[in-house]
Image: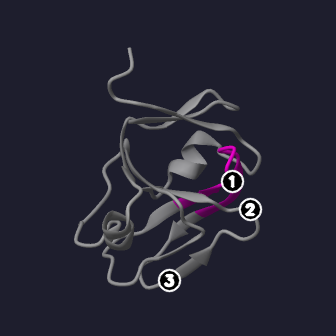
Amino acid sequence: MRIHNVTRGTELANLARAARSYWPRLVGLLGRSSLKPGEALLIEPCSSVHTFFMRFTIDVVYLDRSHRVVKAVSALRPFRMSMGGKGAHAVIELPSGTIASTQLAVGDEIAFESATAA
């Protein structure tokens, strides 16, 4: 799946996967050594994340039910916790530096495009 920032006209990821059921949400990025540029994980529903036992830093974007950014956390290091706060319904985990390089900001509208879409 592709993830676009509609507000800024930028692409956040072109190799994203979704974790919507219990086990994929629980495992998340554990066991991975990195997220390559263009990769991402959408976790839904989700209002907080942790990086316990992870080996790399990530950017975390919290979305409300309308896919608007309610919080953005740059460079969340391993063995940390982060909460999205009021209204957070989903999380996008991205390679560290993605928030800065795409100028993502609170209030931006995010869109998802299936890999099978033309």
Which is more foreground, mark 3 or mark 2? 2
Q: Does 34 sit above or below residue 98?
A: below
Q: Residue at x 65, y 43 (%)?
A: 103
Q: Is residue 87 above or below residue 118?
A: below
Query: Which span is picked out in magenta?
Result: 60-73
Q: Position of residue 55 (x, y in %)?
A: 30, 75
Q: Label 3, label 2: how many angstroms apart (C-alpha)?
A: 21 Å
**Residue 87 marker:** 2
The quarter of the picture where the N terminus appears is top left
In the picture as drawn, the residue positioned furthest to the front comes out as: 21
Label 2 sits on a secondary structure element that is loop
Please provide percent x and percent y for residue 104: 65, 45
Q: Residue at x 42, y 77 (%)?
A: 51
Q: Which residue appears at 29% of the width and 72% of the height? A: 30
Q: Residues within 10 Å of mark 2 (few under 14, many from 20)?
A: some
Which residue is label 3 attached to? Answer: 80
Query: Which picture quadrant has residue 27?
Result: bottom left
- Which is the main secondary structure of the residues drawn in magenta? strand
How busy is the neighbourhood of tag 1: few (under 14 within 10 Å), some, or many (20 plus)? many
What whole-number distance in Å separates the C-alpha atoms at marks 3 and 1?
Answer: 22 Å
Q: Are marks 1 and 2 in contact (CB under 8 Å)?
A: yes
Give the CA distance from mark 1 to mark 2. 5 Å
Q: Position of residue 67 (x, y in %)?
A: 65, 44
Q: Secondary structure at mark 1?
A: loop
